[in-house]
Structures are given as structure tokens and as C-alpha cells.
Amino acid sequence: MTRPYVVTPAERVRVPFLRGILTRSLLDADLSFDDAYEVASAMRVQLQGETEIEADELRDRVGRLLEERFGAEVASRYRSPTVAPTTILVESRDGQCRPFSRGLHMRFLGASGLRPAVAAKVTTRIYEHLLRVGVKKIPTCKLGYLTYLALLRSLGKKAARNFLVWSAFSNSGQPLLILIGGTIGCGKSTIATALAHRLDIVRTQSTDMLREVMRIMMPERLTPVLHTSSFEAWRKLPFGDEGHDDAGRLVADGYQSQAELVTVSCDAVIDRARKERVSLILEGVHIQPSFAQNLREVEDAMVVPIELAVLKQKELKRRIKGRGRSAPLRRAQRYLDRFDAIWQLQSFLLAEADRCDVPIVSNDDLEQALDEIVLLIMARLKTAFKDEPRAAFGLPPRRRDRIGDEKERREAS
């Protein structure tokens, strides 16, 4: 589809119409992201077949569309934006300036444990405060401290402390390594994707993909245990099932034999992340609790191991059936036919997690599981980052007295 051009004759500017740009303008009119995106998409459809449109006409047409869908008040906010500067520059510690992004600010708050709706309210409050007092540029250290004070006043010490710890960690340059283990169907990849979005982590890796690469490099005749499912790897062991009455022990032995091979690739991925100082989420059935336990001792990264589980057999079966409907190639029926082995493998992994003191998270509800994982991450970070508020944000210490306390209260409000 050919994009029309938006023309501003007075400034001799001619730029392509971009849905993302219009979406951001609508967010400034206090629309939700979903509503803003829907309106911007509708306007793009309206503009099909047009080669260009003047900026004033575009604004008028968007305003009419807003009035039809959301009423005159919303349309008025879009047509007549505040006279305060809509772009507030945030200056980083290295001197680079970027526009204040409410989306990034909300995600940073979410990473410290706030629910999205609560984070949105806090971000809006801070942004409106900066506009109201006429701030055009603010250092990241002062923005962080202002956010801390706002959280302290509106949500209390716990929320403010979590934000303080997350800020101190983010400024430390250390990578965060999150290791998510669990058997088939417990939601590892879904949790990893959602967690990466919440924590703004760009690097994720599945151990299943590592195993696939290893299978190409290592023929089945050399490593037969690698070329089967984790819960059936015992069938490829030299002794097979001869003389073994404990089915659970057989499943565990086969799994461990396969996982130890995949651990070689896991080590390489983790070492690369540590060298590059890049945060990483590594997920997969091959994350053995003992492997995660040993990584806790590294000094150049913050390691958080998690064992994910679905503790009810009926629910785990339902999840596996759902995999088959959403992705037929994942062979749900094959997994259901061997459900007993999968359940035995989970039982072994949970026992190992308990032995190795790896936290177990029950994934009955996605949002609750995410919240619990974020709290586990915060608990780990709190053991290493205990700076006072001003020091955590890189601000010089200030003598605490009644005048200083009153000033902080005013800033927080």
C-alpha cells in the first residue's frame, strides 16, 4: 500500500503518513494505546488512494473521527494540545538527550513490580507535573529520584524501595540472567516472552533450539539420547529398561543424560551474555535445578533460577491439548499418549528444585505467575543493592532536616 504524504506548506515539509506517529499524538490526548492504534489504523484506511494531505486537514479529519467515537472532549484535547512543551528531553549520564517516553517509563515501573494500570497512572502523574512546572530537560538521575518520591508518597515504602533497587541494578551495568525450567506444557516460552517484554530484555533463548542445533552437529549414531524427547531419553540409554522397575527413576536418568549434553550449549550462551553484559532469559526443560544452583555463585551477573510447574494433572493435560490446537506441529496427541512420563519428569524436577533451593512458581494464571517471578527477581536484587535513595540515582547526599523533608514532600506531590 502506497503511503500518502503529509504536507505542511508554511514550513515546506513533506513527510509520509506513519501510523506510529499518529498513534503517539493520540496517546498525548490521553487515549489508551489500543484506542489510539485503532484510530490511527482507521485513518490509514481512509487515506488509501490519496497521494497527499495537508497537516491541518489531517488533524481536522482525525478530530472528527475522535468526536464520532469518543466524544467532543477527547477530540478537543487532540485538536488543542497543551501549550506546555510536549517534548521533554531526558539527559542520560553520558550527556545524550532523548524525548521523555511514557511507554518506556511505564515499562521501567513495571519491571520494578507495578501492575501496568498502576504504572500508567504514576507515569501520567509525573509527566503532567513536569509539563505543569515547565520542565524542558531533566537528567535521568533527577527523573528517577522524582519517580521514587512519587511512589513513596502514593504507593508507600515497598513500591518505592522496589523501584530504587531496580534503578540501582539498571545503573550497575550487570546483566540479569533468568533461568526458567519446567516440563512440557507448563508455559515456559509464554512466560519468557511476557517477562522479556515487562523487563525490556531483548535476548531470550530456548534450550529446545539449542538441542536442535546440536542434533545437526552430532549424528544420532553417536549421541542417540540427544535425538529423542526429554521424557523418553531413557529408551536410548545403554541399559534401556532392563532390570529397572522404577519408571520414574528411568525417566529421570534419561532426562539427565540428555540435559547434560545440552548444558554445554547453555553454558556457551550464558558465557556470551556475561561477556557482553547483556541480560538474558534462558528457558527450557533442560535447565536442571542443579545447573541453575551452581550459577548462583557468579560475581559478574545477577542470576535468578525458577522452576515453572502446573501442579494439577488435568490442567497440564488441558495445556498440552491447547498446544495442539494452536500449533498442530507440536504433536499434542503424542505427548498425551506419554503423559505419565511427562508427569514423572515434572515430579523429579520439582524434587530437584526443592533440594537445590530453586523457587517453584505455579503457573495457574499468567499474570499472577509473572508478578511472582518479578517479586523473586526483586528479592534477589535486594541482596546486592542497598544504596540510599539519592546515591542510587547518582545524586549527591543532602543533609536531612525538617526543611529538606518538607521539600521532598513537595516534590513528591
Image: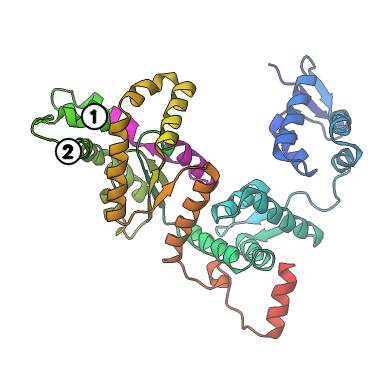
Per the image, the residue denoted by label 2 is 246
Residue 160 drawn at (x, y percent): 60, 65
Majority secondary structure in the magenta region: helix
Contact, mark 2 vs mark 1 (Cβ under 8 Å):
no
Frontmost residue, 337 versus 199 = 337
* Residue type indicated by callout 1: Glu
Q: Secondary structure at mark 1?
A: helix
Q: Is residue 78 left or right of residue 395?
A: right
Q: Which residue: 40% across, 44% down?
A: 308
Question: Is residue 408 depicted above or below 60 in this figure?
Answer: below
Q: Is residue 331 left or right of residue 14?
A: left
Per the image, the residue denoted by label 1 is 232
Of callouts 2 and 1, which one flags the residue occurring earlier in the amino acid sequence? 1
Seen from this angle, which residue lies furthest top?
49
Residue 48's tag is none
Residue 363 drawn at (x, y percent): 46, 43
How busy is the neighbourhood of tag 2: few (under 14 within 10 Å), some, or many (20 plus)? Answer: few
Judge whether residue 101 can be spotted in this image: no
Work out which quarter of the rendered image holds the N terminus and state it: top right
Question: Is residue 42 depicted above or below 344 in this figure?
Answer: above
Judge whether residue 355 can be spotted in this image: yes
* Residue type indicated by callout 2: Asp
Disc 2 or disc 1, which is closer to the eye?
2
Frontmost residue, 348 versus 83 = 348
Q: Which residue: 68% across, 80% down?
A: 404
Q: Which residue: 47% across, 27% down?
A: 322
Residue 408 drawn at (x, y percent): 69, 74
Stretch in magenta: 189-212
